[in-house]
Amino acid sequence: MIGDLFARMRHGDRNALSRLLSHIARGEFVDDIRSLLIPSPQAPSARVIAFTGSGGVGKSTLIGRLIPLVRAANRKIAVLACDPQSPLSGGALLGDRFRMGSTSDDGVFIRSLAALSGSSGLAKHLDLMIDALEAFGFDVIFLETVGAGQGDVAVGHHADALVLLLQPESGDDVQWEKAGVLECADVIVIHKADLPTADQTMAQVRAAIDLSPSHHIPILRVSTKLNQGHAELWQALESLPARRLRPSIARRLFQHLIESQECHLRELEAEANAELNKLLADWQAGTLSTVDAARRLSALFSRSLLASADVALRDGLAPGSRSPKASG
Ligand SMILES: Nc1nc2c(ncn2[C@@H]2O[C@H](COP(=O)(O)OP(=O)(O)OP(=O)(O)O)[C@@H](O)[C@H]2O)c(=O)[nH]1
Ligand SMILES: [Mg+2]
């Protein structure tokens, strides 16, 4: 049943994508979905950008204004708005705002997560939602999140880039600085730059950043009210270097490796160790899926581990020590 839904989603059925996201948000069929969604090096990868900042700093309005720029660059965009604090605004509001200024567009998908999932367990499955959106074919994924400090840094771990929004006169810059978030940001936006004290805020943030090791972070002034600064922001985001592998993906591959290690420990038989190069070559060429590659890799590791442990025990050496027999 999840397999069907997944297949429909892969064929561009937005309804199926929506239902899949709902299952993920509710923590249903998560293992099945995870095994269907294991990323592969051949799959086109989306650029994931997280927007964070205090409630009311203007994340939704800003994202709403960036969407047309992303579309003008011929990219398909999905937005996941995570706002556990205020489930009634967040993504729903963003969706309304965007729809106000635009007709329905197949290249845009907006999903409020708060309305689905409440506050718990969201971060846990965010990776999976991102993978689903990526598998559907979105080129750009925006995450909107609200919170203070640590939580936002954590959201940054799901993304290729973290954009921190600050607004004049909120004192937020001090709060973010304390939490170490200023330094985790890839781009800092002084939003609502139309407000009179924007220059002052800009100077304070610049002073804080200049003293830190991350003094190269771009700081941009944006006013959504005056429609200023969005093109520069999008350009800054586009020119950020792509991360080759999101940490979340690496973690999941690793987790998968460990899980399949357990399954395959008992299936070991003596086979040629030259398999390793062949296996990696097949995986890179796309003729071997990531799931199968991980399974076979773990089987190989298990075998050599057992062989060396066996030799070590017989020779009275600690496991892992090299002996002529173990290397054979
Ligand atoms: N002066 C000014 N106000 C703005 C600007 N952009 C947004 N606002 C206002 O700021 C308020 C909050 O905007 P949202 O986009 O809902 O802010 P948010 O950060 O998404 O809020 P939450 O999702 O609740 O955390 C709204 O009343 C906007 O009209 C701007 O550039 N200048
Ligand atoms: Mg919002």
Image (cartoon, rainbow, N blue to C red):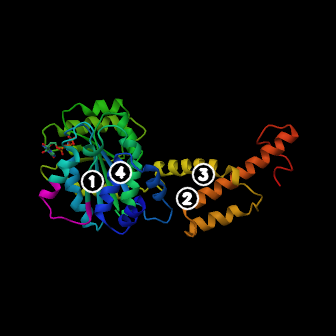
Nearest to the observer: residue 107 or residue 216? 107
Mark toward the viewer: 1 or 2? 2
Q: Earlier in the sequence, mark 1 or mark 2?
A: 1
Cβ atoms at labels 3 and 2 below 8 Å apart: yes
Q: Secondary structure at mark 1?
A: helix
| Disc 1 residue crowd, few under 14, some 14–19, many 20+, Cα 10 Å | many
Tag 4 residue: 23
The image quadrant where one finds ligand 2 is: top left
The verdict on label 2 being within 8 Å of ligand 2 is: no
Q: Secondary structure at mark 4?
A: helix
Q: Earlier in the sequence, mark 3 or mark 2?
A: 3
**Location of residue 70 (image quadrant):** bottom left
Q: Which mark is residue 260?
A: 3
Q: Give the quadrant of the N terminus.
A: bottom left
Mark toward the viewer: 4 or 3? 4
Q: Which mark is residue 291?
A: 2
Cβ atoms at labels 3 and 1 below 8 Å apart: no
Cβ atoms at labels 4 and 3 below 8 Å apart: no
Query: Where is 308 relative to 203, above or below?
Result: below
Cβ atoms at labels 1 and 2 below 8 Å apart: no
**Relative image position of residue 151 (x, y in whole percent):** 36, 36
Tell me which amino acid carries mark 1: Leu
Mark toward the viewer: 2 or 4? 4
Q: Which residues are magenta?
A: 97-108
Membership of 206 in magenta stretch: no
